[in-house]
Image: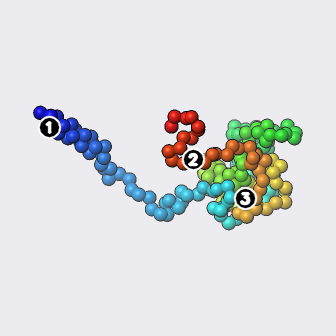
Amino acid sequence: MRLLKLSSLLLLAVGVCVQAQSPTYGLGRAPTAEEVAAWDIAISPDGKELPAGSGTVAEGEELYVLKTCFVCHGLNGTGATAPRLIKRDVGEVDDPWDYGRVLPIRSPYATTVWDYINRGMPLGMEGTLTPDEVYSIVAYLLYINDVIEEDVVLDQDSLPKIEMPNRNNFARVPDWFPRQPRLEGYPY
């Protein structure tokens, strides 16, 4: 009797395992290498992945209007429906967060601003800007926020070297290793 109970329990467990491995029904496929490469467009803080190209403040100011950035962000980077792009006029501050939550100011790296604009703008037409256009728009935004001078030309070499005002205002993430609690005394 005991063997019969164990056998039925084992059969039930195997049935559950088989059910957990449900069929794929032939839907979907593995992406090709070209498709993965097209999606792999993130730019790291050191800018190693930045494409060739360049842009100036003057070109960026012109593109800001031509690419209709002003429709959402306002002619001067503020006053429209989308978040402001220019810092608040509060004079000199000790903490860059006092300027407000402005992408070009709150970002710790200039490459992050480039990456965000490249992948996320213009809204509804994401990914349509050329690298030169992105460099130019970033140059304009950094200029109107007093991060760079008007005559600076941004490219894949100069952009990562820009010292952003908020670079040192982020907490360092501590090292973590498997089976180590993330915080001392934390249960898991």
Q: As shown in the figure, which amino acid type bears the numbered disc 3?
A: Pro
> Which of the two marks, 1 or 3, is nearer to us in this view?
1
Left or right of 178: which side holds 70? right
**Distance from label 1 to label 2 (Cα)?**
47 Å
Q: Which residue is depicted at the point 69% across and 43% down?
A: 171
Residue 80 visible: yes
Residue at the right extreme, as displayed: 91
Q: Earlier in the sequence, mark 2 or mark 3?
A: 3
Q: Secondary structure at mark 2?
A: loop
Q: Is residue 80 or residue 12 the one in the foreground?
A: 12
Residue 148: where, in percent of width, then height?
82, 54
Q: Which residue is mark 1?
A: 3
Q: Does label 1 or label 2 sit earlier along the sequence?
A: 1
Position of residue 149 measured from the top left corner of the image (x, y, whole percent): 85, 55
Tell me the tag on residue 108: none
Q: Residue at x 20, y 41 (%)?
A: 11
Disc 2 designates what residue?
176
Q: Secondary structure at mark 1?
A: helix
> Amino acid type of disc 2?
Trp
**Label 2 to label 3: alpha-carbon separation:** 27 Å
Quarter occupied by residue 129: bottom right
Mark 3 highlights which residue? 160
Q: Tell me, yes or no, whether the two marked residues, 1 and 3, touch with CB atoms within 8 Å.
A: no
Q: 10 Å neighbourhood of mark 3: few (<14), some, or many (≥20)?
A: many
**Mark 2 surroundings within 10 Å by alpha-carbon count, few (fewer than 14), some (14 through 19), many (20 or more):** few
Q: Quadrant of residue 156?
A: bottom right
User: Which quadrant: the N terminus?
Assistant: top left
Rendered location of residue 114, percent (x, y): 68, 54
Q: Is residue 7 above or below residue 47?
A: above
166 on left or right of 22: right
Assign a secondary structure to mark 3. helix
Q: Residue furthest bottom?
A: 52
